[in-house]
Amino acid sequence: MIKTTFTILLGGDLTLTDRLQHALAESRFIAADGGMRHAKPLGVEPELWVGDFDSTPPALVEAWPQVERHPFPAAKNETDGEIATAEALARGAQRLILAGAMGGDRSDHALQHFLHALRLAEQGVDVLLTSGLEEGMPLMPGQPRVLDVPKSSMFSVIGFSDLENLTITNARYPLDRYSLPFGSARTISNVAEGAVSLSIDRGRAMILARPYDLTGA
């Protein structure tokens, strides 16, 4: 069964690539504030535009008068991205793509996107973060992942806690039920030998892949 996918357009960097276009096929779209600037290059029209619009220039608003907007005050307890994901889930999203979740001018926002994705994964939501050139996916207990990237692609596993029984197969540096201490660099800059399988028994982690970086060859 195909999951209902929503793509949230966020304010970070986004490069149009073949992998990004493939990931976005059949998706519905919601823009979060200045993330609307990605709509035209992607050739999509979001069904909703939310945020406090503090990072949206007037010309961008004028370019999309037909898109429904839900404005929020700047003094709020959620980021525009969190508001957008909540709207997507309320509309039946079973899978979320956070496009533009990496890079950009705000490191605090980029880190918050990672943490938000981990929280969503704990709730059973399938989440992909992407800049087009880099991809991220949460790795949670009981939720083994397959990283389908070209051979020789670079990838890392970033632990947001101690990781128990981390297993990585089909990689240059495999691990078998390894206990990774929080803050360890052991799982930085690995190299895919094809589709990589990853799992943990306890902890929280983010898989970061660079499918167009074949420097590990």
Image (tube, helix red, strand yellow):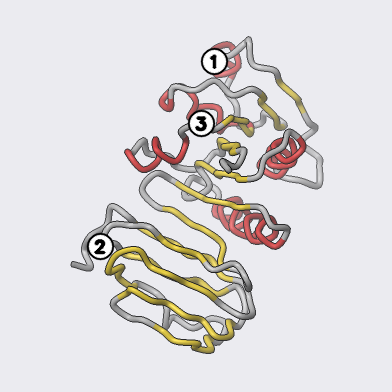
Residue matched to label 3: 26
Instruction: Indicate the position of residue 165 as horizontal and vertical percent values.
Output: 55, 85
Q: CA distance from mark 3 to mark 2?
A: 27 Å
Q: Is residue 40 left or right of residue 121?
A: left
Specify which label sits upstream in the sequence, 1 or 3.
3
Q: Residues within 10 Å of mark 3 (few under 14, many from 20)?
A: few
Q: Are marks 1 and 3 in contact (CB under 8 Å)?
A: no
Q: Residue 6, which numbered label?
A: none
Q: Residues within 10 Å of mark 2 (few under 14, many from 20)?
A: some
Residue matched to label 2: 151
* Residue at x 51%, y 81% (from the top left corner): 166
Q: Is 19 placed above or below 170 here? A: above
Q: Is residue 213 left or right of residue 26?
A: left
Rendering quarter of residue 89: top right
Specify which label sits upstream in the sequence, 2 or 1.
1
**Location of the N terminus (image quadrant):** top right
Residue matched to label 1: 59
